[in-house]
Image (cartoon, rainbow, N blue to C red):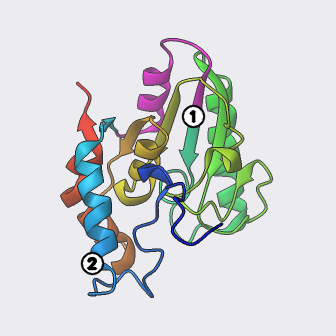
Amino acid sequence: MARGAATARKPLRDRRPFGRCSSLAYTGRCEPYLREFFHGVRLMARAPIRSVESLDDVVAFVRSGSDKVVILDVDNTLAPQGASLEDFGVLVNGAIDRLEASPGIGRVIALTNGPQRGVGRMISRGNKPWTTRRRLGLRGDSRQVVVIGDQVLTDGVLAWRLDATFLHLVLDDEEEDAHQATMRRVGRIVVGLFLRRDR
C-alpha cells in the first residue's frame, strides 16, 4: 500500500487499548490509546446487565424465548479457584449438561482464560474480553447471546463487545486473592461505561 493511503480501522469493540503498551500500568505511552478508546466507549450503546446469585437464576432467565447462545465463564463462576481437576470436571460438565437441557437454550459455550484441565467441551485460553466471534464459532450467527460470569472487566466487557446480555454472578471478594479482588473492585467502578441495568 502506498504511503499515506487510507487504512481500514478496526471497530471500537475489537480494538485493544493496551495493545501497544508494555503492561496494564497507566503510562504516558498508553495515554493516547486509552483516551481514544474510552471516548468511543462513552458514545456507544451499553449492554444490558442483570445480577444473578446461582445457576437456578440463570435457568429462570433463559427459559423465555428460544435458541439462545449461552457463553458461560468457568473459573469462579462454576468452579472455585484451586478446585481439584476431578471437582473441576464434575462442576463444569454438570453445569453444561443442565443448561443444554434447559428450554430456551440452543447452544452452550464454556469459556475460560485458563488452561484446558481435562474438559474437552470447554474453550481454554479464551483471551477474554477480546475473544472473537470466529473463535467462539459465532461468526454470522444472529441468535441472541447471553454471557454469564463474575468479572465485569472480562465477562462483562465481552458481553458488551458481542452485543449480548450479561448475567453477572455477584460474588464476595473478601477471601479472594489480590488480583481477582482488585479486578472485581475496578469492575464496579467502570461498569457504567459498558453496561446498563436491565430491570
x and y, in percent, of residue 66 in the image: 58, 13
x and y, in percent, of residue 171 in the image: 33, 54
Quadrant of the rendered structure where residue 172 is?
bottom left
Give the residue pinned by disc 1. Answer: 70
Quadrant of the rendered structure where residue 112 is?
bottom right
Quadrant of the rendered structure where residue 2 is?
bottom right
x and y, in percent, of residue 98 in the image: 64, 31
In the displayed structure, would residue 172 be above or below residue 174?
A: above
Nearest the viewer among 74 and 9 is 9
Is 146 situated left or right of 36 in this image?
Answer: right
In the displayed structure, would residue 16 be above or below residue 30?
A: above
Is 156 situated left or right of 107 in this image?
Answer: left
Compare marks 1 and 2 and give the one earlier in the sequence.
Answer: 2
**Quarter of the figure with the N terminus:** bottom right
Q: Residue at x 58, y 63 (%)?
A: 127
Mark nearer the viewer, 1 or 2: 2
x and y, in percent, of residue 149 in the image: 45, 48
Secondary structure under tag 1 reads: strand
**How dense is the environment of label 2, judged by Cα within 10 Å: few (below 14), some, or many (20 and up)?**
some
Q: Amino acid at mark 1?
A: Val
Give the residue pinned by disc 2. Answer: 31
Magenta span includes 64: yes
Does the image show residue 94? yes
Magenta span includes 104: no
Q: Amino acid at mark 2?
A: Glu
In the displayed structure, would residue 64 be above or below residue 133?
A: above
> How far is disc 1 from disc 2 in space, using C-alphas?
35 Å
Residues shaded magenta: 52-70
Determine contact: label 1, label 2, CB under 8 Å: no
Secondary structure under tag 2 reads: helix
